[in-house]
Each structure stands twice: as structure tokens, then as C-alpha cells.
Amino acid sequence: MALLIDIGHGGWIPAEDVRARVLAHAPGADVRVRTDPGALEQITMLAVSRLDADWPGKLANLKLVQKLGAGVETIVAHPALPPHVRVARLKPVAPAREIAEYVLAHILSAQRHLPHYRAEQAARRWSPVEPRLAAETEVAVLGLGHIGACAAQVLRDAGFRVTGWARSPKRIDGVACRHGAEALPELLEMADYICAILPSTVATRELFGADLLARMKPGSTLLNAGRGDLIDQAALVAALDAGRPGAAVLDVTAPEPLPQDSPLWTHPAVTITPHVSGWHLGEDAFADVAENYLRLQSGAPLLHEVDRVRGY
């Protein structure tokens, strides 16, 4: 039984580094990387950031795909992945905290008018603007899972009025929690900032279409640190032109990388970052990968197994 690690794209943690960290938690395990996979029939577990199209057909004895991260939509919907292959994700602390810091950083930048001051400095103008008070600012966090709950708590602790939204009822101290599709439009109408931290599912794809975008508070900001396909990007451009919302911060897009001819690149109300809000996995993530390797061997229940039908 062997574990193969394949990041599936460049610009992130090298597979060799992931292998070393997993081995630190499971000494003696058979852990391989794509550049030296060995006998493919021995591989029963595959750990990936992005699942390449060729692996399901090559790994005849594959039993588990471990996502190195949270979003699993491209794995559970992979047309070549046999139905008996299980899928697991991670719930590490480090990237959840980083995503919370990401949305907080952009909100604070807007609250303290930092883009305005950068422009004024370039023009050599001294023009103070009153900052907005956190206690008078409404922030909505959509998605109250592992990552969204962390973001809601960080924003709450920074003094903002935070309302969370999820499909089912949730409880977070100091955060007003709402649930169900009927509660979402009213929440968007009152929020100054909307932080979308939702998975990609049948229910959430293009959730932010023209109708829902039109319900947003004029001048509000939509921050997407969930999945790119949560937003109808053509509808977003039209909505930004109409001022509802007034701005968008996009760490994720559909597709990725964002095509060079996309109008989002040059829209004055859009800030784009290249899927960097949650970067580090943290030691607990590597420990969970190692633990799932051992549990797969022993037949024990897996950590954070995904329901392939529901998609999360």
C-alpha cells in the first residue's frame, strides 16, 4: 500500500516537501511523488491539490483521494473517478486563519480608505477622510463551516457587527446566525461587506447571479474567498457598473487562472488576487494526511470523508 503525492499545479508547496512532512508523522510509510511513483499498482491513496485527468485510469487499486485543502468539487465530479473511490478533505487551522485575515485585511483597507490615500500620495495631495467605525459596519459571512466560522469569529473580535449565513442552523457566540435560502436576500440588503466562503455545490454554483447581486446594498463590497463559480462573472460586471455591489474582491475565479481577456482584470471596482488567501497547510494537515493513510490500511473510519453525492 502506497501513498502518491501530486500537487497537480505549480506555484504552491512542492510535493517533496509534503512528502517529508507526512513522513514525519508516519515514519516508514510508503510515500511517493509524481516524479518517482514506482509501481502504480501499489498505490492505494492519492493526495492532490488538483486531480489530473490521467490518474484514475492509471491507478487500478486506488481507494482514496485525499484533497490537500478544502474544496473537493472537481474531485467528486471527476468523470473518470470510479464510484468506489473515497474522497477526504482537510480542516487545518492555518489556512482558515489566513482566509479570515485576508477578508479582514481588505475590509480594514476599505474602512481606513487606504486606496484613496495611495492615490492622493501619488498626486501629492493631503486630503484626510473620516474612517468608518467597525461597530457601525455590517459584515455578512456566507458559509459557516470550518473556514467561515473562523472568519466570522475574527471579524467579530475586530469589533464588526457580524451576521453569518448557512444552509442549516449554526451557533457562534457573538455572531447572529441565519439560515436557509429565504434569509439570504434580506441579509445582502443590510450588509456593507459580504464574505463568500462557500463550497462549490449544485446549490451554490452561480449563486450570485443578476437577481441576488441586485439585492445587495448599494456601495457594498463582495469578497469571494470560497470558490470562483459562486459568482456569475458576467452578471457581476453589470452589477458593479450599476453600483450594487460597489466593489468586489476576488481571490478565486472561474476558470483559474482568469483569462487575460476577462473584463474583471481592468474593472476599476475589482481587486483580484491569484487564489492565495489560504496558503499554508499547517502541521495538523500533514498529520491528518498521515492519519488517513494509516486508517485506510487498518480499515478505520477516515478523517473528514466527503459525501460524494452532496459534494462536501
Image: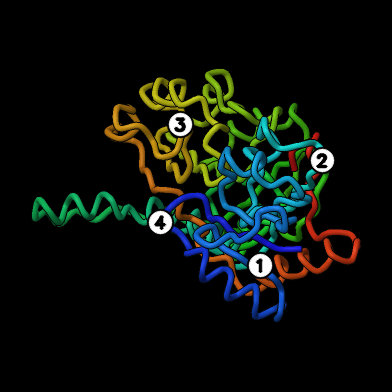
Label 1 secondary element: helix
Q: Residues within 10 Å of mark 4 (few under 14, many from 20)?
A: few
Residue at the (64%, 36%) spot, across then down? 200
Q: Badge 3: how crowded within 10 Å, few (<14), some, or many (20+)?
A: many
- Give the residue number, with chain letter if any, for mark 4: 11
* Mark with earlier residue (2, 4): 4
Q: Is mark 3 on a helix, strand or loop?
A: loop
- How far separated are the C-alphas under marks 2 and 4? 36 Å
Disc 3 and disc 1: Cα gap in Å?
36 Å
Report how far apart the C-alphas of labels 1 and 2 lie in the structure: 26 Å
Question: From the viewer's perspective, is residue 294 above or below residue 272?
Answer: below
Which numbered disc flags the more N-terminal residue, 4 or 3? 4
Residue marked by disc 2: 168
Mark 3 sits on what residue? 245
Horizontally, is 82 left or right of 191 in the view? Answer: right
> Relative to 207, is 89 above or below?
below
161 displayed left or right of 269: right
Q: Residue 285 carries which label?
A: 1
> How many residues crowd mark 2 within 10 Å: few (<14), some (14–19), many (20+)?
few
Say which amino acid is labelled 1: Ala
Kind of residue at badge 2: Ser
Name the residue rendered at 76%, 60% in the picture.
173
Give residue 205's position: percent from left, percent from top: 62, 28
Camera-nearest label, 2 or 4: 4
Cβ atoms at labels 4 and 3 below 8 Å apart: no
> What kind of element bears circle 4?
loop
State the residue in front, 229 or 23: 23
